[in-house]
Image (cartoon, grey):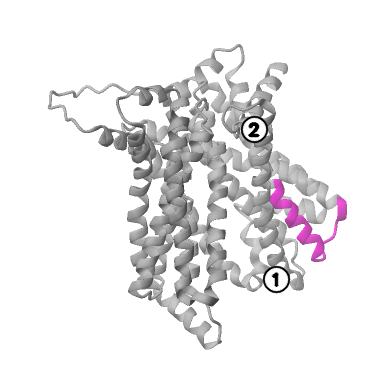
């Protein structure tokens, strides 16, 4: 038991310190970890606080305020599944320290359980901060229970969080197993994750549309959960109605399957991780010509192989572009609906600054593209090969920034065409839209690279830690919010004096930032790279 406790403590500590900013002191690493958890908690509070009170306002007149707990528990589980599925493959089955850990005098079941519980702890943070605002909204709307309600709600959340961890564990293993059977396993994993992500987006959009008139079908909602949604019903009954038997049933429904699946995986854990990491030898080799290419082409090919062959890297760094293209194409297909809504708003006398709003939303999605924020850290222990190569540092930087722009420019072009048709933009507006998108993409590419040079993480246990939990990614993501907000603020301030031409003021700001960042990379950036 002491060994398992030490192992669990190590995994939980590793999860916290994985947010560290470079090679700083332990206190600084721990503070960074807690800061990242604080941001995750804030995100959960914001989402849940917004939707919980909106839902409660519709359900309270019907006396169905308890459904807030039901709906928000579904949201908590769904978001946890999305977050953990992307991490389970790397953390549980693809850790770089598997050889070391499996050689220690501990059982495979203990190792797997400790790693799974570390993911459970990360899920629990999000789930708790989703359910607490839901509980407050329930009580404010007239729900009964008081302090006892909150105690049971938190106990039920502890139990319910086991389910998304279990689902993510199984789905992550299936995707890892399928991809291991193919030669280009990384590319296949990426395609599977993209398909799952797009399916989740479709589900979220359908739920958002259906919640527009929530009160119309709230009476039959509990019946819709009678099959697949039994755990959510049990949580609602235990918390809102004080049914202890429902809480016990929820405990059995969550704990027993979780332990059973972890035990089954643990029985063959060594064989599983060995099989997933194995690479079969080809038997169809043939003599042929060896092609040659320049140094920049070779570096660009390496960047592309890493990006498209690492699902976690692809999704975290490219999710903004995926959403940009998907939403732009969706707007094109729903052009008739958009025109009808805009016509109704115009008839009602509502003046909507359509072009600036669409441009700001698109720029935010483009700014979320951050391949360069991880590219230096992903070199890991092989960085010395890149440094020893007869390639100028400026060429290395140009390739890393250029690769991100090769991703951004085509997506921005597709989005410009689709949105210009869907929203009837003029030729001038379409040109400004394209130029602004490209400028924001270039600014974030330069910024991400410089931040990654300042905050490298070359000793990460797996790629997931680099692209999802490193300090460089966190800082670049915060800069994304600040950049878009600052640009929007400048537009609002200048709109009264410049009118439609005010859009060029934030564009000039972004271009000035690009020039400053390029100068920093050419001076301080090169010094930082040589010192790595």
- Asked where in the image residue 285 lies, by quadrant, the reply is top left
- Is 186 placed left or right of 218 in the picture? left
Q: CA distance from mark 1 to mark 2?
A: 39 Å
Q: Is residue 71 magenta?
A: no
Circle 2 residues within 10 Å: few <14, some 14–19, many ≥20: many
Residue 58 circle label: 1
Residue 149 or residue 435, whichever sits in front: 435
Q: Do we see residue 52 in this rendering? A: yes
Left or right: where does residue 397 sit relative to residue 133?
left
| Above or below: residue 252 compared with residue 331 | above
103 or 41, nearer to the observer: 41
Q: Are marks 1 and 2 in contact (CB under 8 Å)?
A: no
In what element is the residue under mark 2?
A: helix
Give left or right: position of 484 versus 395: right
Q: Nearer the viewer, residue 12 or 512?
A: 512
Q: Secondary structure at mark 1?
A: helix
The x and y percentages for residue 110 are 63, 22
Where does the image place residue 523, in percent across and percent down from the top left? 44, 37
Q: Quadrant of the N terminus?
A: top right
Q: Which disc is residue 16 wearing?
A: 2
**At x 36% / y 75%, what residue is drawn?**
426
Q: Which residues are magenta?
A: 128-147
Magenta: main secondary structure: helix
In this view, 314 is above or below 331: above
Locate residue 530: give its quadrant: top left
Task: Please name whichever residue, 427 or 256, is drawn nearer the observer in this view of the structure.
Answer: 427
Residue 169, quarter of the rendered image:
top right
Q: Position of residue 66 (x, y in %)?
A: 75, 61
Which label's residue is closer to the chain start, 1 or 2? 2
């Amino acid at each position: 038991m002491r060994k398992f406790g030490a192992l669990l403590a190590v995994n939980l500590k590793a999860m916290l310190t994985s947010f560290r900013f470079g090679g700083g002191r332990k206190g600084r690493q721990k503070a960074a970890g807690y800061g990242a958890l604080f941001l995750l908690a804030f995100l959960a509070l914001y989402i849940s606080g917004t939707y919980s009170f909106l839902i409660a306002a519709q359900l309270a007149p019907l006396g169905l305020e308890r459904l807030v707990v039901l709906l928000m528990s579904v949201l908590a589980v769904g978001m946890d599944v999305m977050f953990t599925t992307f991490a389970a493959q790397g953390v549980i089955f693809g850790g770089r320290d598997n050889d070391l850990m499996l050689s220690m005098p501990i059982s495979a079941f203990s190792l797997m359980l400790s790693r799974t519980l570390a993911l459970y702890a990360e899920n629990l943070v999000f789930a708790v901060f989703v359910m607490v605002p839901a509980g407050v909204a329930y009580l404010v709307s007239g729900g009964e229970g008081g302090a006892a309600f909150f105690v049971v709600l938190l106990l039920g959340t502890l139990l319910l969080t086991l389910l998304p961890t279990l689902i993510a564990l199984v789905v992550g293993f299936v995707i890892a197993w399928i991809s291991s059977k193919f030669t280009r396993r990384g590319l296949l994993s990426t395609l599977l994750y993209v398909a799952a992500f797009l399916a989740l987006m479709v589900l979220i959009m359908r739920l958002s549309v259906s919640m527009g008139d929530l009160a119309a079908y709230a009476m039959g909602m509990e019946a819709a959960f009678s099959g697949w949604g039994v755990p959510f019903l049990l949580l609602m009954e235990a918390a809102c109605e004080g049914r202890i038997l429902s809480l016990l049933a929820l405990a059995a429904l969550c704990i027993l399957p979780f332990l059973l699946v972890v035990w089954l995986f643990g029985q063959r854990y060594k064989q599983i991780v060995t099989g997933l990491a194995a690479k079969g030898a080809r038997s169809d080799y043939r003599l042929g010509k060896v092609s040659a290419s320049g140094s920049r082409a070779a570096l660009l090919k390496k960047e592309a192989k890493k990006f498209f062959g690492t699902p976690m890297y692809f999704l975290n760094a490219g999710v903004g572009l995926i959403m940009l293209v998907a939403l732009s194409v969706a707007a094109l297909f729903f052009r008739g609906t958009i025109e009808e809504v805009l016509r109704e708003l115009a008839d009602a006398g509502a003046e909507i600054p359509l072009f600036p709003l669409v441009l700001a939303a698109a720029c935010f999605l483009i700014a979320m593209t951050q391949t360069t924020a991880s590219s230096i850290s992903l070199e890991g222990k092989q960085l010395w090969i890149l440094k020893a190569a007869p390639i100028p540092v400026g060429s290395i930087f140009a390739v890393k920034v250029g690769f991100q722009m090769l991703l951004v420019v085509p997506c921005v072009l597709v989005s410009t065409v689709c949105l210009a048709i869907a929203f009837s933009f003029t030729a001038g507006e379409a040109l400004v839209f394209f130029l602004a998108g490209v400028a924001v993409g270039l600014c974030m590419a330069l910024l991400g690279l410089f931040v990654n040079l300042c905050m490298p993480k070359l000793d990460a246990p797996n790629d997931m830690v680099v692209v999802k939990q490193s300090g460089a990614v966190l800082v670049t993501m915060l800069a994304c919010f600040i950049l878009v907000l600052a640009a929007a603020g400048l537009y609002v301030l200048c709109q009264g004096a410049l009118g439609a031409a005010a859009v060029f003021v934030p564009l000039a700001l972004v271009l000035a930032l690009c020039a400053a960042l390029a100068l920093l990379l050419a001076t301080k950036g090169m010094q930082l790279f040589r010192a790595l």
